[in-house]
Image (tube, rainbow, N blue to C red):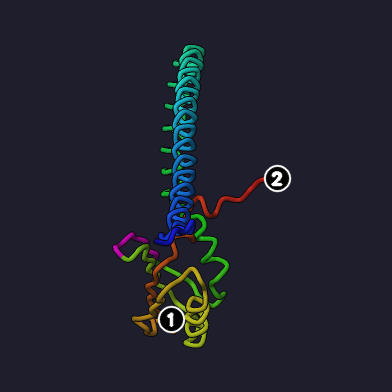
Amino acid sequence: METSFIPKKNYAKATSNKNYVGLFLTIASFIFVLSIVSSIGVFFYKSFLEGEIENKNIILEKEKGNLDLTLIQELSQFDKRMEAAKDILNKHISLVHLFSFLEENTLKEVMYSNLSFEKSKEGYLLTLDGKASSYAAVAIQSDIFGRHKDIKEPIFSDLGVNSEGDIIFSVVMKLDPRLISFKDNLVEVE
């Protein structure tokens, strides 16, 4: 029988497995301690926030007592009146600007005898009956209206000659609402 002091089993593998288990246990312990510390921190932070909310509510209640409710009601009513006035001003039309526009954009050889203004589904319609000294004056007037940004679709019709030799016509046109808007035509006084 031979006796040997060298072990026949390989113990090297067993010690390396113990190293991995020890490393895993250390990481798991670190994560566990970190989660407990985090839980405690969240608990104290939550308590701090609840205290802050309570303090803010107390301050808010004190400030509510300092408010003048009658002044708030008066200001609220004033605000409603101002909004109503703005709405009325935005919808208000003024034909004064229309007459100024016609004066500035009508040839001297053209004269209007009848004016009709109405609001329709398409917008504002202006119908004019007039007379001119010649067909050329009517053509130039048609061109002036056709190039203006505030007039849309001017249609000249009913061309003819009256007993005095003047050229008579009718024109129907759509107006841009800005042309007759009171608000858009306000002049600032300095």
119 magenta-colored? yes
Q: Residue at x 39, y 64 (%)?
A: 115
Q: Is residue 60 visible?
A: yes
Q: Main secondary structure of the magenta part?
A: strand
Closer-to-camera residue (12/88): 12
Q: Is residue 185 left or right of residue 70?
A: right
Q: Is residue 39 above or below residue 180?
A: above
Q: Nearer the viewer, residue 17 or 66?
A: 17
Choose between 179 and 60: the one closer to the eye.
Answer: 60
Residue 65: x and y, percent? Answer: 47, 12
Q: Which residues are magenta?
A: 115-121
Q: Amino acid at mark 1?
A: Glu
Q: Which residue is mark 2?
A: 190
| Residue occupying the point 43% across, 83% down | 167
Rounded to the nearest angstrom, the CA distance separating label 1 from label 2 is 49 Å
Sort mark 2 into few (<14), some (14-19) or many (20+) by Cα contacts within 10 Å. few
Quadrant of the image occupied by residue 185: bottom right
* Residue denoted by label 1: 164
Percent position of residue 31, x then y = 46, 42
